[in-house]
Amino acid sequence: DLDRLEVWAYVDETDIGRIEVGQDATFTVDTYLGTDFEGVVTTIQPQAEIQNNVVNYITVLEVGDTSGHTLRPEMTTTVNIMLGSRDQVLAVPNTSIRTDSEGTHVMLDSPEGPLRRSVRPGTRGRTHTEILGGLTQGEIVILDTAND
């Protein structure tokens, strides 16, 4: 019954302690690139599954609205489980953050040209990272840092 599909996500033992029933999740399938589907954690299986000496726990997601897309059994999914959310934070795209031997930084647009700025990152999400220090709202971060 395609209306009763669920997603089984393998969660590594190092992360399973942060997963709880009721947490929201999103997932993608290769068939519908660019489409995020919603789900909710309904079950965390108590028995571990060990594959290639890696301990995982099966976390079951109830699939939400599929927006007219047909999901099928055995489709490969990429799952993101929402561990928490924060409002009113300064955040930059993950692609703008660089780390090297001198620490973590971003490149800023300035009249003199690109300017390296050390930052203190906070919580990292799927697309953006919170910045706890080093930037202020309104500064322009360069996304293409190929020339830094």
Image (cartoon, rainbow, N blue to C red):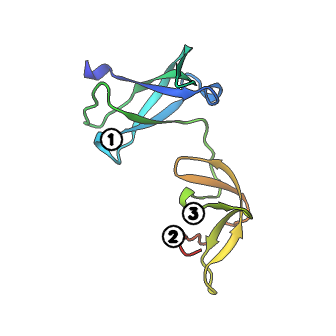
Task: Classify residue 74 as left or right of residue 10.
Answer: left
Q: Which residue is mark 2?
A: 144
Q: Amino acid at mark 2?
A: Asp
SS state under label 2: loop
SS state under label 1: helix
Please identify the residue farthest to the front as the structure is shown. Answer: 52
- The residue that appears at 61% across and 79% down in the rendered structure is 114
Residue 8 appears in the figure: yes
Query: CA–CA distance between discs 1 and 3?
Result: 26 Å
Q: Which residue is mark 3?
A: 96
Image coordinates for residue 143, horizontal then vertical, percent: 53, 67
Please identify the residue farthest to the bottom as the structure is shown. Answer: 112
Query: CA–CA distance between discs 2 and 1?
Result: 26 Å
Task: State whether residue 68 is above or below residue 113.
Answer: above
Q: Which residue is mark 1?
A: 30
- The residue that appears at 59% across and 24% down in the rendered structure is 20
- The residue that appears at 31% across and 34% down in the rendered structure is 66
Q: Nearer the viewer, residue 101 or 135?
A: 101
